[in-house]
Image: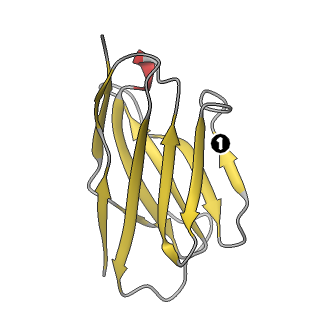
Amino acid sequence: QVQFVESGGGLVQPGGSLRLSCAATGTIFSIAVMGWYRQAPGEQRELVATITRGGTTNYADSVKGRFTISRANNAKNTVYLQMNTLKPNDTAVYYCNLKAVPGTSGYWGQGTQVTVSS
């Protein structure tokens, strides 16, 4: 069983910044990929950013150049998402995800709300 501690969401004005954190705990034998996904009201869940065990990152086109995913130096089960120059259409519930095997659905956090509004 895998549990997540997610934090960092909230309300921010357009152009502002937020930093999301996710720490995975529990029975974790291996981590192939960790990342963040988001789901806006009435929309499907979509990939935001991922980071592999080897450190390779991947971003949705809509966030490239604005968001940065990283991993804690001394804890490979902890990832961060630095979000800069936030826009109203970044408003969504952001979910942390861990995959022990690439290509599988993996484990999901409970989500943290990010609202970008003036």
- Most foreground residue, 22 or 36: 22
Query: On the rendered structure, is 94 left or right of 31?
Result: left
Residue 114: quadrant of the picture: top left
Residue at numbered disc 1: 59
Rendered-image quadrant of the C terminus: top left
Q: Is residue 83 left or right of residue 115?
A: right
Question: For the view shown, which residue lies furthest in the top direction?
Answer: 118
Residue 25 x %, y %:
34, 78
Find residue 58 and report its horizontal and vertical position in percent.
68, 49
For disc 1, the neighbor class at 10 Å (few under 14, some 14 to 19, many from 20) is some
| Residue 97 figure quarter | bottom left
For the N terminus, the quadrant is bottom left
**What residue is at 52 percent from the left and 23 percent from the top?**
85
Foreground of the two, 74 or 44? 74
Helix, strand or loop at mark 1: strand
* Vertical arrangement, residue 7 with respect to residue 63, above or below: below
Colour scheme of the picture: secondary structure
Q: Residue at x 41, y 16 (%)?
A: 14
- The correct choice, above or below, for 62 with respect to 68 in the image is above
State the residue at coordinates (31%, 15%). 117
Left or right: 18, with 117 as reference point? right
Examine the rendered structure and indicate whether residue 40 appears above or below residue 111.
Answer: above
Picture coordinates of residue 41, whole percent (x, y)? 29, 26
**Tally of numbered tags:** 1
* 97 left or right of 117 in image: right
Residue 74 sits above or below residue 22 on the image = below
Where does residue 60 sit, x and y in percent of width and height? Answer: 63, 36
Residue type at numbered disc 1:
Tyr
